[in-house]
Image (cartoon, rainbow, N blue to C red):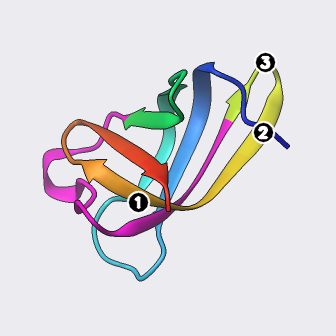
Amino acid sequence: MTSPEGRYTDVNVVPIQGGRGSLIGGTGTMSSFFMFSAGEFTVGDQPEVGEYYNISGVHNGQRYGFPRWKCTHSGGTSDFSEG
């Protein structure tokens, strides 16, 4: 299933190997170049660049999954690309 471009709600981000970067109930955006941006991460629990995360979110009432996506930018809003 192709993940549509646009805004996502109820975004969950889970670190595959444990560690920092958990998010429950956040927001996100899928760009036209397949970069997923998610937030708002707290200052003490931001994802780590280079680490892999399982991500899911709701777009137009349907939940989509992004298994094993790599963090490419870490911050309050962090960016992920397909691993």
**Where 69 falls versus 42 (above or below)?**
below
* Circle 1 crowding by C-alpha within 10 Å: few under 14, some 14–19, many from 20: many
Q: Is residue 40 magenta?
A: yes
- Place of residue 9 in the rendered image (x, y in percent of width and height, measured from the top left): 60, 27
Q: Secondary structure at mark 3?
A: loop
State the CA–CA distance, disc 2 to disc 1: 20 Å
Quadrant location of residue 52? bottom left
State the CA–CA distance, disc 2 to disc 3: 8 Å
Q: Is residue 46 magenta?
A: yes
Q: Earlier in the sequence, mark 2 or mark 1?
A: 2
Magenta stretch in the rendered image = 39-57
* Circle 2 crowding by C-alpha within 10 Å: few under 14, some 14–19, many from 20: some
Q: Residue at x 83, y 31 (%)?
A: 62
For the residues carrying marks 2 and 1, which lies nearer the camera in this image? 1
Relative to the observer, which residue lies in front, 32 or 29? 32
In the picture as drawn, the residue positioned furthest to the left comes out as 43
Label disc, if present, on residue 63 of the rendered structure: 2
Task: Look at mark 1 in the image and give the residue it sits on.
Answer: 70
**Where 56 falls versus 34 (above or below)?**
below
Task: Look at mark 3 in the image and give the residue it sits on.
Answer: 60
Q: Amino acid at mark 2?
A: Arg
